[in-house]
Amino acid sequence: MPTTFFSAAEHAAIIDSIHKAEKNTSGEIRVHIENQCAYELMDRAADVFASLGMHKTELKNGVLFYLSINDRKFAILGDAGINTKVPAGFWDSIKELVLDHFKKGEYALGLSKGIEKAGLKLSEHFPYSKTDVNELSNEISFNKN
């Protein structure tokens, strides 16, 4: 079950990473974890992205970190607003950073490092403003499928 995949401290560290990353940007970062990827990885990540309402952010600057535990699948999906700003291969570079930690069993640390790097890029293109509203929850979402 995904909810027990992370210890309480690891769970808190991931959420803290999201909070810290979003302090400097109007961008929105979500983490979604499930046991099994029901179908093709990027299609599933896109469905989760939509089900979490990430496509509804004002500046189209949401980023999803998707992890399927049992089949060991991981994807990062950015919305159109951020995808038009980042260089080709940017998400792949974050994915490699995260996967390097995953290979060592450092799942929470890997996600936190990836979130940090995504937050830095989001802050370059979508800096935080005083009128910024946190459009999406920072909580990790789970699907027990």
Image (cartoon, grey):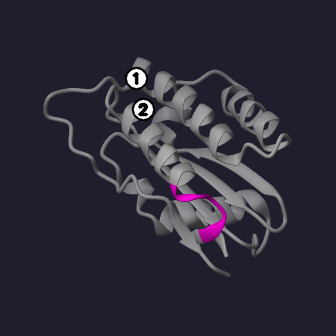
Image coords of residue 17 (percent x, y)? 47, 38
Depth order, front residue of 4/128: 4
Residue 112 is situated, as x and y percent measured from the top left of the image, at 57, 38
User: Magenta segment, which residues?
Assistant: 4-8
Left or right for 10, reference 107: left
Q: Quadrant of residue 68?
A: bottom right
Residue at 75%, 75% in the rendered image: 38
Q: Is residue 116 above or below residue 134?
A: above
Residue tagged 1? 123
Query: In which quadrant of the rendered image does the N terminus lie?
Result: bottom right
Which secondary structure type mostly characterizes the magenta part of the structure?
A: loop
In the picture, the disc for residue 21 is 2
Q: Marks 2 and 1: in contact by CB < 8 Å?
A: yes
Which amino acid type is marked by label 1? Ser
Secondary structure type for disc 2: helix
Q: From the viewer's perspective, is 63 left or right of 37?
A: left
